[in-house]
Amino acid sequence: MPRDLAIGNGRLLVAFDGDYRVRDIYFPHVGLWNHAGHDPFRFGIWVDGAFDWITARNWNGTLRYRPDTLVSDVRLVNDELGLELVCADTVDFHRPIYVRRMVVRDLRGAPRHVKLFFHHDFYLFRDGVGDTTYFDPLTRGIVHHKRDVLFMANAWAGEQPGFDQVSTGTKHLHGLEGTWRDAEDGNLSGNAIAQGLVDSTGGVDVRVPAGGDAVAHYWLAVGDEFFAVKDENDMVVRRGPDALIERTNHYWRHWVTREDLDFTGLDPAVRDLYRRSMLIVRTQTDDDGAIIAANDSDILQFGRDTYTYMWPRDGALVVHVLIQGDHRELARRFFDFCLRTIQPGGFMLHKYNPDGTPGSSWHPWADADGNRILPIQEDETSLVLWALGAYDERFKDTEVVKPLYAPLIKRAADFMVRFRHRETGLPAPSWDLWEERYGIHTFTVASVYGGLRAAAEFARGFGEEAAADEYDTAAAEIREAAFEHLYDEGEQRFIRRLEVTDDGALIPDMTIDASVCGVWRFGLCEPTDERCVSTMHSLRDRLWVKTDIGGVARYEDDYYHRVSDDIERIPGNPWFICTLWLAQWEAAAAQSMDDLERAHELMRWVVDRALPSGTLAEQVHPLTGQPLSVSPLTWSHAEFAATVQQYVARARELRGRGG
């Protein structure tokens, strides 16, 4: 199930599914560890002898954010119970505290005795072994702890903070489902402690006047030991949970609206999704520099792995957007992360955990004959330098670049100069950006060109003319070879890749693939170059999904999450990323304001297919438009933001010359 809402502060990340259930809780890094993720945290309500676990299936309403901030705006109505709930959720912008404000409103015109129940299904460090949960009489909260992570749940509905009733117990053992079952009669057993595979539930009483409403609060504080978490809990009580919500509301509005971006001519919904995308990107960015691909743990059903890693490729493309948005400190932390994780040989690995350790991988260290190969996508190395070049151009911050120059920039550039296919001069074979095929890929070639050009500028700036000339020469050779070997004169387009056979033969892969957009994105050719124009036209014609949903597929006959074998009509599921690449090119190549409207239409296409909260998935169903794969996907949001930035920049140029 997609994650409709994600809220976080760079250390603590909390995500909700479409039923308004907490599904992911990450701490102390964004993406590591997920202390939930197995089963949902339930939110229940008892009133007039009836009990209900709140889901979107039995409560009508919407899950949204307040405009331009990371505070939720959740509105749910249950006509059968005669109640309305209006909730605001946030993670404090500075402290490791998640807070929820709940307004309970009577719709029957009678006073109501309501009990709210909060169920916690923690799997600390994701294994469910050796956890402890207990009721703390000092704070009247519920504690879950193991090793150096401790969560304290608490609530406030009356004159004094604290749960009115609690239950701790065992789950999924000996026929026991969990303490959430204990809540369904409106009363909890009061069991004070449990260890092993455990869960807990706390409840508070709320008195709602006839036709009126009452307010209750709930929060989770997290830290590495009891007294640190107690201090956080005491701060919530002392300042009041509403104060934390409102200060966080103001902080994120200030963060996202400071950017000096001229939205003139853009649909207000496009502007709103741009800001939402920047905020969601921030929730996926760890304070230590990692930018994770997605927080949605439901992808576990496929191969028992997730997207909660830092791919240097995704990270570089995302950080480029943050750079253009003037978020220089977040960008600096990303480059510091890359400095810590680059290999001695000068290349980045497939992906990394948010703490900088290598992530899982399916890229082998040997080919079918047992010969050693590097398990890399070279674009993950080159794009880091390309993005760093954009940082330097934007901020001219030599003090930040200085410690990166020798161990990161030169090391990576020297690797890219060496890692070449002897016969053509192109980059040597590696894995493609989709992580599916081995060969010499047009996207990778273009990214290496962009990375080497950036490295040459850095070398020249540091007075190393010989190195600059070496990088420039390699880039020029790669560019010339790309036009010779990767552009097909007969088809009038760039091809996807060259497959290198064991005997050295080069077999062109003629599959139409959206990734060839890299030829202009990284400077290999101008967006108005005839070769680029004809390539983009063929991409638009062949990869557009010919249903009422529309959008651009990744490539012809894409198998990933396939829902139709009608390849002529549906070459693959529409991807937000690929549709936005087309929009970016339309903007970059526009010669008039009228031309820019094509990019604008594609941005509105994205707006129309976002969830009501503004969240973008990886793909959408080609027949229904429902989200597929993970959601939110950081890369999708970054590409939407990049498209708006490209549009605004091009509009400024065209207006400047009277276009």
Image (tube, grey):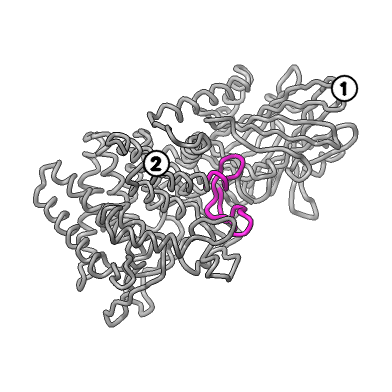
Check residue 111 in the rendering and tell me which mark sits there, or answer none: 1
Q: For this view, does 284 lie left or right of residue 365? A: right
Looking at the picture, does residue 137 appear above or below residue 486?
Answer: above
SS for tag 1? loop
Q: Nearer the viewer, residue 515 or 456?
A: 515
Q: Which residue: 41% across, 52% down?
A: 581
Determine crowd level at label 2: few under 14, some 14-19, many 20+ residues with C-alpha closer than 10 A. Answer: many
Given the image, on which type of amino acid does mark 1 rest?
Pro
Segment colored magenta: 606-631
Q: Is residue 615 magenta?
A: yes
Given residues 435 and 184, the one toward you in this image is 435
- Left or right: where does residue 14 sit relative to residue 364? right
Instruction: Find residue 289 and name its label.
Output: 2
- Residue 435: which quarter of the image? bottom left
Residue 373 within the segment the image draws in magenta: no
Residue 659 falls left or right of residue 273: left
- Residue drawn at x 58%, y 60% as measured from the top left: 547
Asked where in the image residue 646 lies, by quadrant, the reply is top left
Residue at 21 percent across and 35 percent down: it is 398
- Circle 2: element type: loop
